[in-house]
């Protein structure tokens, strides 16, 4: 994301704080690599998929996998046996209705590894709709783990219960395609994580003279229409100097998307809708989105960023990082007509407006850094309310489009601000 003028990093005290954040991030990255995939009891769990129907192809080797994908007919399910598959090249799905999934349903047991691949992308979808990728791991990729080549028709894609690990540009990426768009996709129950911040050696295209090692994010969708991004976990998506892109980054005339019940921990940016740069001929970056019931913990650049949007509803999200030097929990830049920010709980942050044109509707938000331990286990990412936290919070009216909380529990009326409903009594 383009840097804005007069960045807070221009000030020495903030630079010092950010240097400390960088060191902590390096230490945390080393610990993640040792500990294995991040997991907590409150992380979302995917229900098991039903057994496949119709044409099924079983594969147990890299050669069989490559042949099955290359020769896949429409409505084929490719079931991959447990194993570590070191792919020598990019795989591309080109038939409608293809499903690529593990046979066991265990996403940690089928690993598609791009470490030795001669290409910088691992799995692509081209000129195909109704494709599902599920229950597997994609790891060690220079550029894009799963690429939607939506300069051809690519619609109704489902990416479900996957681990996307150590992908150094984008875990899931769609391209600019204003004529075709990409419609009706779902990304759900996935874990996106990197073992450590990005290094120059991870990606020869990310250099000191362009992105300085910070061109990295998890989901980057352009021209996306009616997509749903839900119940995912993002951990440690970090650039070399902790100024990477969003864990969830959606822009370039995307419309009608829903972003809900995601958990974002220790990523440089949380949810970014739009970019401070809007090219000529681009009327907006994101329109008519509903962003609700998300947890964001320690996102030093921007927990939530909004620029050149239309009709966005940002409601009942919880953000925590009382030691953040930037203090901007929700950052609104330039024109965002119809923006509504309601019932969010921002512990340690403010709502920051920069060069804003037109009104922003705000109601029921609590932006306060003085709360005392309102959450169950904030350091670990659990922003559900502790009993002591409930006593510190005001009640707010329940909103018609947020009848349940991040756990799916019904909200009372009145309810608490933030993603977790608690027990208002």
Image: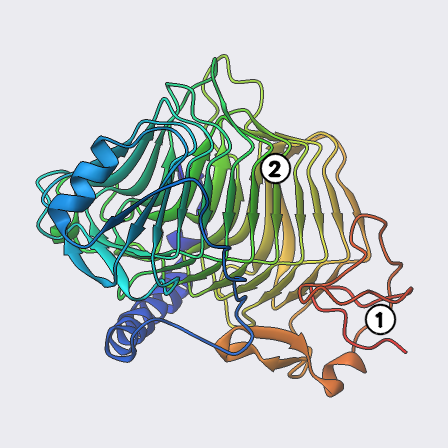
Q: Visible in this render: residue 88?
A: yes
Q: Considering the numbered disc 2 on the image, is that residue within a helix, a strand or a loop?
A: loop
The residue depicted at 64 percent of the width and 32 percent of the height is 256
Q: Visible in this render: residue 209?
A: no
The residue depicted at 77 percent of the width and 75 percent of the height is 422
Residue tagged 1:
394
The residue depicted at 9 percent of the width and 44 percent of the height is 88
Is disc 1 surrounded by few (<14), some (14 to 19) or many (20+) residues within 10 Å?
some
**Does residue 346 lie above or below 76 as drawn?**
below
Taking depth in this image into account, of 214 and 193 the one nearest to the observer is 193
Residue tagged 2:
257
Q: Position of residue 388 (x, y in %)?
A: 74, 87
Q: Where is residue 94 in the image (x, y as percent from the top left)?
A: 31, 27
The number of numbered discs placed on residues in the rendered structure image is: 2
What is the quadrant of residue 77 in the picture?
top left
6 sits to left or right of 124: right
Q: Considering the numbered disc 1 on the image, is that residue within a helix, a strand or a loop?
A: loop
Q: Earlier in the sequence, mark 1 or mark 2?
A: 2
The residue depicted at 68 percent of the width and 32 percent of the height is 288
Taking depth in this image into account, of 246 and 64 the one nearest to the observer is 64
């Amino acid at each position: 994301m383009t840097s804005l003028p007069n960045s807070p990093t221009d000030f020495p005290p903030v630079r010092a704080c950010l240097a400390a954040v960088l060191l902590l991030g390096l230490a945390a990255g080393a610990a993640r690599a040792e500990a294995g995939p991040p997991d907590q009891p409150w992380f979302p769990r995917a229900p098991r998929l039903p057994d496949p129907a119709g044409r099924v192809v079983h594969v147990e080797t890299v050669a069989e996998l490559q042949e099955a994908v290359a020769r896949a007919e429409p409505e084929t399910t490719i079931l991959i046996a447990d194993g570590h598959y070191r792919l020598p090249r990019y795989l591309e799905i080109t038939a409608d209705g293809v499903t690529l999934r593990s046979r066991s349903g265990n996403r940690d047991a089928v690993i598609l590894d791009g470490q030795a691949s001669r290409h910088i992308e691992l799995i692509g979808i081209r000129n195909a709709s109704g494709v599902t990728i599920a229950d597997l791991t994609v790891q060690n990729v220079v550029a894009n783990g799963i690429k939607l080549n939506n300069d051809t028709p690519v619609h109704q894609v489902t990416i479900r219960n996957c681990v996307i690990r150590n992908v150094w540009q984008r875990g899931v990426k769609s391209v600019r395609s204003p004529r075709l768009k990409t419609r009706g996709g779902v990304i759900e129950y996935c874990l996106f994580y990197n073992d450590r911040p990005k290094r120059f050696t991870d990606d020869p295209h990310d250099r000191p003279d362009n992105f300085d090692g910070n061109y990295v994010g998890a989901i980057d969708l352009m021209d996306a229409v009616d997509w749903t991004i839900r119940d995912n976990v993002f951990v440690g998506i970090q650039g070399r100097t902790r100024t990477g892109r969003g864990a969830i980054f959606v822009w370039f005339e995307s419309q009608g998307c829903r972003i809900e019940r995601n958990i974002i921990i220790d990523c440089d940016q949380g949810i970014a809708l739009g970019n401070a740069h809007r090219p000529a001929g681009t009327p907006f970056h994101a329109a008519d989105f509903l962003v609700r019931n998300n947890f964001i913990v320690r996102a030093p650049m921007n927990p939530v960023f909004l620029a050149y949007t239309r009709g966005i509803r940002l409601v009942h999200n919880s953000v925590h990082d009382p030691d953040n030097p930037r203090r901007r929990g929700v950052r609104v830049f330039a024109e965002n007509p119809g923006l509504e920010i309601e019932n969010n709980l921002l512990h340690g942050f403010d709502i920051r407006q920069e060069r804003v044109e037109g009104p922003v509707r705000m109601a029921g938000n609590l932006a306060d850094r003085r709360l005392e331990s309102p959450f169950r286990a904030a350091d670990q990412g659990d922003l559900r309310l502790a009993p002591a936290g409930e006593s510190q919070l005001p009640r707010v009216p329940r909103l018609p489009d947020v009848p349940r909380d991040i756990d799916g529990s019904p909200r009372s009326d009145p309810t608490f601000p933030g993603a977790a409903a608690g027990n208002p009594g």
